[in-house]
């Protein structure tokens, strides 16, 4: 299906790996102009080449450290300046540390708020005027299935992502009349570096074998497999297109059935 994204201008944050990278590639395959943001622009050069090879109308790397909020608005404005507009924003972040509540320090809470919640607030402030000027847009925040069902040892992620869902819902009602649709994507276990880190963490913390540590993540997944990041990217591209024009304020589970929620 041609999603009509050719020439549309997209920004993906935390894009060097995993779900962000897969989403950038999916948007590129639809012919969008794709900006990938990360802490080290040089490390994104190869991805920029891959985006162009995949079919992107244009591609660029932009320096943004989600922990350094002063880098965010200049990054957004640089993308809008080079591409001429900004239509699509995938607000992806790194994941916070895992562990039981009493093991999570105040510093870790502050860092997670700083790197997961506040950058999405500042980035939304920066991208919305460009979308208003363009006559519409799509904002998607990457959260977790933990916003639908609490997960053991994920108190930082599950708590702060609920705030992100609240942010998306608030923006959705405020900007839908301007054709700006705002949604959250709620991944269950996908096969990325982050998932590998979580598996290794539970092996080390709980003394589990690799098979048992993987089972911790898969036992509750009726589909009995890790998600393919490419499938995640395909949903991002669909929501980013005109086909996503009547979907806003939702938190969509991509979780192989894990959440059990309606
Ligand atoms: P990943 O670890 O594979 O990739 C994370 C990306 O974030 C990397 O590109 C990293 O460089 C970037 N990043 C981290 N801190 C950054 C910073 N301060 N500034 C800029 N970039 C930064 O993770 P992933 O599996 O692709 O997950 C993406 C998001 O989805 C995470 O927030 C994660 O918590 C969430 N999530 C993932 C899964 C999963 O199974 N993979 C499940 C639920 C939620």
Image: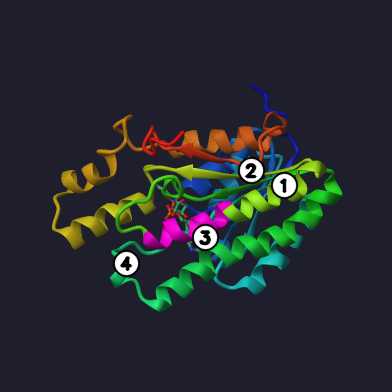
Give the percent coordinates (x, y) of residue 77: 76, 61
Residue at 67 percent of width and 33 percent of height: 244
| Circle on res. 43 | 3
Which residue appears farthest toward the top when viewing the image? 1
Q: Is residue 36 visible?
A: no
> According to the image, label 1 marks what residue?
173
Q: CA distance from mark 4 to mark 2?
A: 30 Å
- Residue corresponding to mark 2: 249
Q: Nearer the viewer, mark 1 or mark 3?
A: 1
Residue at left 52%, top 47%?
A: 21
Classify 197 as above or below 176. Answer: below
Residue that extends furthest to the front in the rendered view of this protein: 262
| Real-space CA distance between mark 1 and mark 3, rounded to the nearest whole angstrom | 37 Å
In the image, is residue 3 above or below residue 200?
Answer: above
- Dominant SS of magenta comes to helix
> Earlier along the polypeptide chain: callout 2 or callout 3?
3
User: Where are the magenta residues, as a range?
Assistant: 155-165
């Amino acid at each position: 299906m041609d999603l009509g994204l050719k020439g549309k201008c997209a920004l993906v944050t935390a894009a060097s790996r995993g779900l962000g990278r897969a989403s950038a590639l999916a948007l590129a395959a639809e012919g969008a102009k794709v900006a990938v943001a990360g802490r080290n622009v040089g490390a994104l050069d190869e991805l920029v080449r891959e985006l162009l090879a995949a079919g992107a109308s244009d591609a660029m790397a932009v320096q943004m450290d989600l922990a350094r909020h002063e880098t965010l608005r200049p990054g957004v404005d640089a993308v809008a300046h080079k591409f001429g507009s900004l239509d699509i924003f995938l607000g992806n972040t790194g994941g916070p540390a895992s562990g039981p509540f009493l093991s999570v320090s105040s510093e870790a809470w502050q860092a997670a708020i700083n790197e997961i919640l506040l950058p999405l607030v500042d980035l939304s402030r920066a991208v919305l005027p460009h979308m208003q000027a363009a006559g519409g847009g799509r904002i998607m925040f990457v959260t977790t299935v933990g916003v639908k069902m609490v997960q053991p040892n994920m108190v930082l992620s599950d708590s702060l992502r609920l705030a992100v869902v609240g942010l998306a819902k608030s923006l959705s009602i405020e900007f839908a009349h301007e054709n700006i649709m705002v949604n959250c994507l709620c991944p269950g276990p996908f096969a990325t570096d982050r998932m590998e880190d979580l598996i290794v963490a539970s092996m080390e913390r709980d003394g589990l074998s690799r098979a048992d540590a993987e089972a911790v993540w898969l036992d509750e997944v009726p589909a009995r497999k890790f998600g393919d990041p490419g499938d995640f990217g395909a949903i991002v591209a669909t929501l980013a297109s005109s086909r996503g024009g009547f979907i806003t304020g939702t938190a969509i589970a991509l979780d192989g059935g894990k959440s059990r929620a309606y």
